[in-house]
Each structure stands twice: as structure tokens, then as C-alpha cells.
């Protein structure tokens, strides 16, 4: 089932997507049980938003064999945080700070499978981990490589405004262990890998992260990116497509 968050007539709503039709729900589908209202919308008549409004966003670094290069494989998942207020959704612009584009720094997309926590908990076991997942969505962990390489922390490289991209909706029926991830820049394929290449799968990630911090409904975990992404520039259209979910598309814009 596809769940969508959208805006119509300046009102933010949650709904179920069936084809091009949205059945509005009475509240936030992640946080509470909701009922269908009598309102329906066509997806072409609304503004699509990030499908979740998380309390925290956790990303996992170096989690694909194809992304490691000559670096050693992490023995455990390697989490870092992205600020939730840097979140944008489908069709929103990714804005590159002037400090990056005016100095010709390397900016790249990172296509990722993202999971959304539905049932919170602490010290969740791998055996029970999937029962805590509400669903999955596409993600783009936008990164300024020069800052990622040279700064003490990754906050600037990966948590500028608009650098946390998720959407277009949440899909509940996804095989997280065997789904194809593709990234395209202007239609040209720059990443293509299966989630079977993950070093640490979804159950292990949830177990490890929840051993240290409590996971709450709505929290997002970005599971890592494969391969070697390519550079992106102003005017480029970046697409992240994940099998069983859909396509997340965004345009690159330089900060004026």
C-alpha cells in the first residue's frame, strides 16, 4: 500500500494513493490509527510533500560493498545524523549553498533505500526488527565531497538545507533485502545496484541503532548508497528509482 503526504489549498494532509487517486486520511498514518475521510484528490492537482515528518533522520555510511573502494568494511553499521528540518520531497529543488558552487566543489547524489519506523522501541532484536518498520521510501543523501573529506564532522557536507531528500511516498510492500536501486542524472544512469549488496541489512541496522537510542514512530533510517555516484550541477534533474516503490525526482539549483 502507498501512503502519501500532500498539500491542497494550503492544508497538509495524509492519504492512501491508489493509481492517481488519493484517499484522504484523518491524521498522520505513521503516528496513529486513522480513518478515511470523504475527500479524494487527484495526484496531479496537489503538491507532494515529504511522505514523513520525522523526529530524527539516521543515515548509515559505507554500507555497500560496491561503495567501499579500498576502504575496509565496517564491522558494525556506521550511523550519522542528518537534520530533519533539511528534509524535502518529490519535485522540490535541491539547493547547493553558494560556498559550494562558487568554489566548484564536488556535489553528488546518493541513492538510498530508506525505512520509516512505525513501532518505536529500544534494543530491538533482528528477529523482531521488520515488525517495527512502517514502510519504505526512496532517499537521496546529497553530499558535498570536499567538505565530507576535509571537515571534522559531516554536518556541513550532508545536512545543508534541502540535502535530505525522501519520497515520493511510503510503500509498505517492499523486499528490502532484494530490491534494485537506480540513480539517474538527466536520464543517464550513474548508480545501479541491488540491496542484496548491503553489508548490514535492515534488521541488523535497526538492532544496532536501537541498542544505543530509542527509535520512535516516524523516524527515518537511510541505509547507505552503492557504487560511485557522479557529479551534479545546476539545472540537472536527479532521479532515484527503487524497485517496488517508485521514482523520486528533484532539480538542482544553486543558491543565489
Image (cartoon, helix red, strand yellow):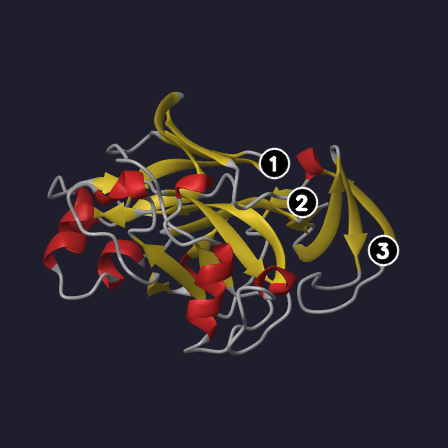
The residue singled out by tag 1 in the image is 244
Q: Earlier in the sequence, mark 3 or mark 1?
A: 3
Label for residue 36? 3
Q: Which of marks 2 and 1 is nearer the N terminus?
A: 2
- Spatial distance from mark 2 to mark 3, Cα to Cα? 20 Å
> Relative to the observer, which residue lies in front, 50 or 191?
191
- Please, which residue is most extreme toward the front here? 127
List x then y, in percent, for residue 7.
65, 50
Residue at the image point whose x is 48% and y is 68% from the top: 207
The residue singled out by tag 2 in the image is 173
- Please, which residue is most extreme toward the right here? 38
Q: Is residue 106 left or right of residue 199?
A: left
Q: In which quarter of the image is the C terminus?
A: top left
Against 129, residue 165 (above or below) is above
Residue 86 occupies quadrant: bottom left
Check if mark 3's residue and mark 1's residue have beta carbons within 8 Å. no
Instruction: Identify the element where label 2 is drawn.
Output: loop
Amino acid at each position: 500500500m502507498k501512503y502519501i503526504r500532500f498539500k491542497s489549498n494550503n492544508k497538509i494532509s495524509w492519504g492512501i494513493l491508489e493509481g492517481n487517486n488519493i484517499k484522504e486520511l484523518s491524521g498522520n498514518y505513521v503516528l496513529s490509527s486513522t480513518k478515511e475521510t470523504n475527500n479524494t484528490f487527484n495526484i496531479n492537482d496537489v503538491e507532494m510533500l515529504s511522505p514523513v515528518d520525522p523526529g530524527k533522520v539516521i543515515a548509515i555510511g559505507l554500507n555497500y560493498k560496491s561503495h567501499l573502494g579500498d576502504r575496509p568494511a565496517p564491522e558494525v553499521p556506521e550511523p550519522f545524523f542528518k537534520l530533519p528540518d533539511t528534509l524535502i520531497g518529490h519535485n522540490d529543488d535541491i539547493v547547493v549553498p553558494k560556498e559550494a558552487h562558487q568554489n566548484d566543489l564536488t556535489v553528488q547524489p546518493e541513492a538510498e533505500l530508506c525505512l520509516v519506523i512505525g513501532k518505536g522501541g529500544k534494543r530491538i532484536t533482528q528477529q523482531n526488527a521488520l515488525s517495527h518498520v512502517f514502510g519504505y521510501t526512496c532517499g537521496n543523501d546529497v553530499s558535498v565531497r570536499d567538505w565530507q573529506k576535509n571537515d571534522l564532522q559531516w554536518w556541513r557536507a550532508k545536512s545543508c538545507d534541502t540535502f535530505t531528500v525522501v519520497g515520493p511516498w511510503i510503500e509498505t510492500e517492499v523486499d528490502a533485502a532484494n530490491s534494485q536501486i537506480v540513480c539517474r542524472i538527466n536520464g543517464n544512469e550513474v548508480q545501479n545496484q541491488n540491496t542484496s549488496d548491503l553489508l548490514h541489512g535492515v534488521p541488523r541496522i535497526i538492532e544496532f541503532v536501537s541498542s544505543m537510542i530509542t527509535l520512535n514512530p516516524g523516524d527515518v533510517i537511510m541505509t547507505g548508497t552503492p557504487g560511485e555516484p557522479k557529479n551534479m550541477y545546476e539545472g540537472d534533474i536527479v532521479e532515484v528509482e527503487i524497485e517496488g516503490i517508485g521514482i523520486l525526482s528533484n532539480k538542482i539549483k544553486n543558491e543565489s
